[in-house]
Image (spheres, grey):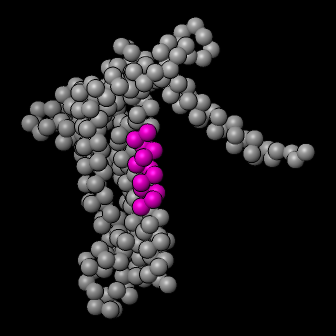
Amino acid sequence: MRRMNPSHISFVLVLTYLFLPVAATLIYSLATEWNKTVLPEGLTLKWFAELFRDFPFLQALGRSFLLSGLTTVAALIVMVPAIFVIVVYAPRLERWVQTLVMMTYAVPGVIMAVGLLRTYSGTGIPMILVTAGAYVVGLLPFIYQGTRNSLRTIHAASLMEAAELLGASRGRAFVKIIVPNIMPGILVAGLLSFSILFGEFVLVNMLVGGRFETLQIYLYAKLSKSGHIASAITVTYFLFMAIISGLAVKFSRGNKATRKEAAS
């Protein structure tokens, strides 16, 4: 009989540890009652039907997508060219930029929210814009590392030199050559950033609260009312993240296949 590798056993245990809570949440979101028995007393889709008939839930879901998506896109548009300029044309500044970027980890969300409230509460600036700005700053480490690693992998400086020798301007070379080659890294950074923002609760709750109810705020409000509905929201959140991850991976592989065909 073939012995099981200890590394395989460890892998199975880790997967079980990670997915058991998700499986339990899924079962509870489908249970009619689950109070006195080991397994649910019955299964139903009533909680999901009730959830998707709830217009405030659909609004909260739309707000979360809107805030997370627009903030992520804006952050990528601003940061990717800036990181490219630093990596290719000012490499001596990389050490200092990397230090500044990593300093965002040093500020807890609660302290940041209190500081932003004291600074901007009386200025007339909408707090939702302040929240989006804070999100952009919080995304710096993820976008910086993903873009920087991609630029190093493709030897961006050499590609730019070759493009300029062939008569392309720096802007055109960046858009036509650099961006398509680092698109997988941008997608990964964008996906990670979107996932983080989509699940963020502290900043948006303290800065705007119920005035801009996102999915996480809606979930927090439902926790004390119905565990079944809260579980259905959690499962829906996981499904959305799985779909977005699958689309990003598929698009990333499509870009790689296109580049290989072009090279051949």
Q: Residue at x 42, y 68 (%)?
A: 255
Quadrant of the snapshot with the N terminus: top right
Q: Nearer the viewer, residue 186 or 248?
A: 248
Residue 94 position (above or below residue 132)? below
Which of the pair 85/129 is nearer the observer? 129
Q: Residue furthest left?
A: 124
Residue shown at the point (42%, 24%) measured from the top left: 45
Give left or right: position of 214 versus 125. Answer: right
Q: Reply above or below: 96 against 230.
A: below
Judge whether residue 247 can be spotted in this image: yes
Taking depth in this image into account, of 90 and 45 the one nearest to the observer is 45
Is residue 215 highlighted in magenta? no
| Residue at 29%, 74% in the rendered image | 175
Where is residue 258 drawn, in percent x and y? 43, 74
Furthest-bottom residue in this view:
166
Q: Position of residue 98 (x, y in %)?
A: 41, 58
Q: Please report the residue visible at 45 percent of the width from the left and 37 percent of the height from the top.
A: 238
Q: Which residues are magenta?
A: 239-251
Magenta segment main secondary structure: helix
Considering every residue shown, the one lying at the far top of the view is 36
Instruction: Please provide percent x and percent y for residue 11.
Output: 69, 43
Number of numbered tags placed on the structure image: 0
Residue 152 in view:
no
105 horizontally vs 212: left or right:
right
Which quadrant of the figure has residue 212?
A: top left
Q: Is residue 261 above or below residue 120?
A: below
Residue 241: x, y in percent?
42, 43
Depicted 197 relative to depicted 185: above or below: above
